[in-house]
Image (cartoon, grey):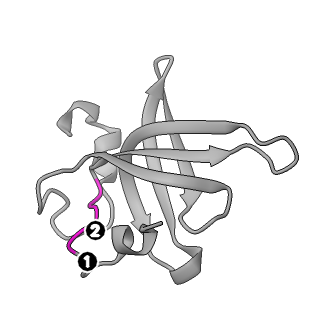
C-alpha cells in the first residue's frame, strides 16, 4: 500500500486537500463487510502513525464528515479519484472553507 507516499509532504504523489478520494474500510473483524465512502478530502492531520484524514460528502441532502485514521488496519484502501491543481490549498493542510461553499471545488 502506498499510504506513506500519498500523505508525505515532499512526495511527488502526495495528495492535497480538495482532492476527491474513495476510502474503503471493513465494518468489523468478526463479520467483515466492505464499506466505501467517497468525498472531498477536507483536512490531513499528519501525526506519524496517528495521522488522520477528514472526508466530506453530501448524503441525502445532509453534509457528512468522516475522520479516518490513515494507518488503521480497518481502512483497506485509499484511492484518489480526482486530484486538485497544485496550490489549491495554498500550502495548508485543510480546506475547511468548502463547508460553506460546497461548489467551490
Which of the pair 59/4 is nearer the observer? 4
Which of the pair 16/14 is nearer the observer? 14
- In the image, taking residue 50 as reference, residue 3 lies left or right, namely left
Residue 86 painted magenta: no
Are dots 2 and 1 in contact, CB under 8 Å?
A: yes
> Residue 20: percent from the left, percent from the top?
32, 44
> Residue 74: percent from the left, percent from the top?
68, 56
Which of the pair 31/47 is nearer the observer? 31
In the rendered image, the quadrant that contains the C terminus is top left
Residue located at (24% from left, 82% from top): 10
Residues shaded magenta: 12-17
Residue located at (44% from left, 27% from top): 58
Residue located at (60% from left, 55% from top): 75
Circle number at residue 11:
1
Tag 2's secondary structure?
loop
Residue located at (51% from left, 17% from top): 60
- In the image, taking residue 60 as reference, residue 80 lies left or right, namely left
Above or below, 58 against 2 in this view is: above
Classify mark 2: residues with Cα within 10 Å, few (<14), some (14-19) or many (20+). some
Above or below, 51 against 32 in this view is: below
Circle number at residue 14:
2
Residue 13 painted magenta: yes
- In the image, taking residue 27 as reference, residue 43 lies left or right, namely left
The outermost residue toward the front is 1
The outermost residue toward the right is 30
Above or below, 85 against 49 in this view is: above
Amino acid at each position: 500500500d502506498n499510504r506513506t507516499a500519498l500523505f508525505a509532504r515532499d512526495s511527488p504523489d502526495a495528495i492535497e486537500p480538495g482532492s476527491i478520494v474513495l476510502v474503503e474500510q471493513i465494518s468489523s473483524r468478526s463479520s467483515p463487510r466492505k464499506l466505501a465512502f467517497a468525498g472531498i478530502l477536507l483536512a490531513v492531520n499528519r501525526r506519524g502513525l496517528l495521522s488522520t484524514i477528514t472526508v466530506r460528502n453530501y448524503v441525502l441532502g445532509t453534509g457528512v464528515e468522516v475522520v479516518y485514521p490513515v494507518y488503521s488496519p480497518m481502512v483497506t484502501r485509499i484511492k484518489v479519484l480526482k486530484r486538485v491543481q497544485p496550490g489549491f490549498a495554498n500550502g495548508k493542510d485543510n480546506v475547511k472553507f468548502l463547508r460553506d461553499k460546497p461548489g467551490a471545488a
